[in-house]
Image (cartoon, rainbow, N blue to C red):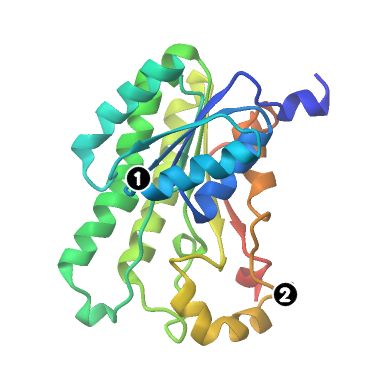
Amino acid sequence: MGVKQLFDLAGRSALVTGGSRGLGLQIAEALGEMGARIALTARKKEELDAALAHLARLGIEAHAWVCDLGRRETIPPLFDAILAKFGRLDILVNNAGATWGAPAEEHPLEAWDKLVNLNLIGTFVASQQAAKKSMIPAGWGRIVNVASVAGLSASDPAIVKTVSYNATKHGVVGMTRQLAAEWGPYGITVNAICPGFFPSKMTRATLETVGEAIRRATPTRRLGNEEDLKGLAVLLASEAGRHITGQAIAVDGGAMLV
């Protein structure tokens, strides 16, 4: 098989959660450009409509469903609807997530519950639904979890104090490894992309205050941009990544090295 064939996603279908903007939409662009049919979910219909229009301008076939993955009971019907539309789901990108900043000693428990429900439980239930209803029967699947470098180490408290975010993203990395071990025999790979600082709605406030310091402390002297996750996402979603599983890959310009 040639290299272009290894990366080709024609005939595949992919769901990107939290795909209406930011990193999720960038990943949807990449998978769609490589030929995959795209399903998007997010909480806000108007943002999904804008994302569909954007992808249509790029010539990418996409469909959208409004869903709050922080409410676990909404997830099985979502997958039933997507499978009714596409027939199968080959690729799942668990991108939907939230953060919360507060000193650990003052962190509200309701915020902790919100992050656990979305970042951790939502990611697991979506993965379970994709595997059980499509990937295991098909004998092929790709699950890509968008974790964070905050799931690989502690964060500098001078920059952010995000104990619940770090805890849930560490959980996503651990879940990634365990699902990879359990589902490998079914032809399913499970990996985590761990972005560093990328400009987004979630990071805007932090970057406005300490963005320049983050750049100076990063070996490449830059933040991530709208193209920096695309290549890795396609690799992990395609046949080219068939022997890569259980990995948590930092995309941070080397910031974790120093």
Q: Is disc 1 placed on a helix, strand or loop?
A: helix
* Spot occupied by residue 155 in the image (x, y as percentages of width and height): 46, 74
Residue 217 placement, left or right of 84: right
**237 and 38: which is toward the camera:** 38
Q: Nearer the viewer, mark 1 or mark 2?
A: 1
Look at mark 1 in the image and give the residue it sits on: 45
* Residue at 56%, 68% in the rendered image: 199
- Labels 1 and 2 touching (C-beta < 8 A): no
Above or below: residue 257 compared with residue 239: below
Above or below for 34 versus 167: above
Nearer to me, 32 or 206:
32
At x 49% / y 61%, what residue is drawn?
A: 152
Q: Position of residue 52 (x, y in %)?
A: 50, 40
Q: Is residue 22 above or below residue 85?
A: below
Q: Is residue 102 left or right of residue 242?
A: left
Residue at horizontal 64 percent and vertical 70 percent from the top = 223
Say which quarter of the image contains residue 108: bottom left
* SS for callout 2: loop
Determine whether, in the image, residue 151 is placed left or right of residue 79: right
Q: Report the label total.
A: 2
